[in-house]
Image: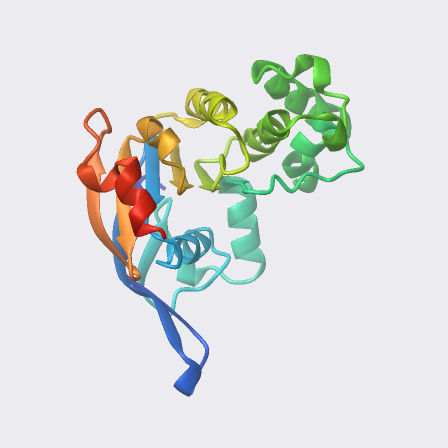
Amino acid sequence: MSCENAVSCRGVRKDFGKGENEVRVLRGVDLDVPFGGMTFLVGPSGCGKTTLLSVIAGLLHPGSGDLRVLGVPLSQLRNGRAVEFRRRNLGFVFQQFNLLPALTAAENAAVPLLAAGWDRRKAIAKATALLEDLGLGPRVHARPNQLSGGQQQRVAFARALVHDPRLVICDEPTSALDAGSGHQVMELLRRIAVRPDRAVIVVTHDNRIFPFADRIARMNDGVITGITSGVTNTPAYLEPDYVEKETQ
């Protein structure tokens, strides 16, 4: 199905709890994520970024509003159909990498293909080729505890990209990395993941990687409060001093 944006949110709300304990985390989010670039979602802790990311990923159901991912209204997908949609179309990069300690780098990267029923030899071969492209050719047989933080993050990126997803979702992908490693993995992510028919969403507090964004959506108190296109001229509210004050 063709569609103009990878993600379209209109009036998306999400509550947790019931009655007196009910907390509204998303208060009517309006957001478009276009194909062909990286959209960063930034804002203070507790503003709803991770909840919105989980709703877009189909891991949480929105309470109300219209949400379309790759042109598909997620509310119409239930159970196995939702799982299959995520498996085929979405790639995930997590803050903590979540690599399986007993598996090699190539085996970890191949997990989405193995879960989809690929022949093991072919899955490992495709994962190995991607890891080589990410500069990990000599380390494909190493286990996570034999890899540096930056190398583990590259394996996590390979796992997220190996099945050619149309939407890649990253939650704080550089928070555990130093500045050099963070820039390196973001350069790799842009080179591998950004395509005319793909999109990348990055939730981050790391202002060091803002220059990699094509669009920056600022979130506060459960709503999108502003969107900046391009980052050659970083707006004042995204300068490091401002973000640092806002997130204290």
Residue 138 sits in quarter: top right
- Looking at the image, which is closer to me, 211 or 138? 211
Residue 24 sits in quarter: bottom left
Q: Does residue 17 lie above or below 75 as drawn?
A: below
- Looking at the image, which is closer to me, 226 or 197? 226
In the image: residue 192, left or right of residue 209 = right
From where the camera sits, is residue 194 visible?
A: yes
In the image: residue 234, left or right of residue 113 = left
Q: Does residue 229 lie above or below 128 as drawn?
A: below
In the image: residue 168, left or right of residue 223 = right
The residue lying at 50 percent from left, 25 percent from top is 185
Q: How is the image coloured?
A: rainbow
Position in image of residue 44 (x %, y %) = 34, 52
The residue lying at 70 percent from left, 37 percent from top is 114
Position in image of residue 158 (x %, y %) = 58, 28
Position in image of residue 58 (x %, y %) = 47, 55
- Looking at the image, which is closer to me, 225 or 4? 225
Residue 213 sits in quarter: top left
The residue lying at 55 percent from left, 30 percent from top is 157
From where the camera sits, is residue 36 visible?
A: no
In the image: residue 146, left or right of residue 42 = right
The residue lying at 46 percent from left, 55 percent from top is 54
* Most distant residue in the bottom direction: 19
Position in image of residue 6 (x %, y %) = 34, 41
* Most distant residue in the right direction: 102
Give the number of marks: 0
Quarter holding the N terminus is top left
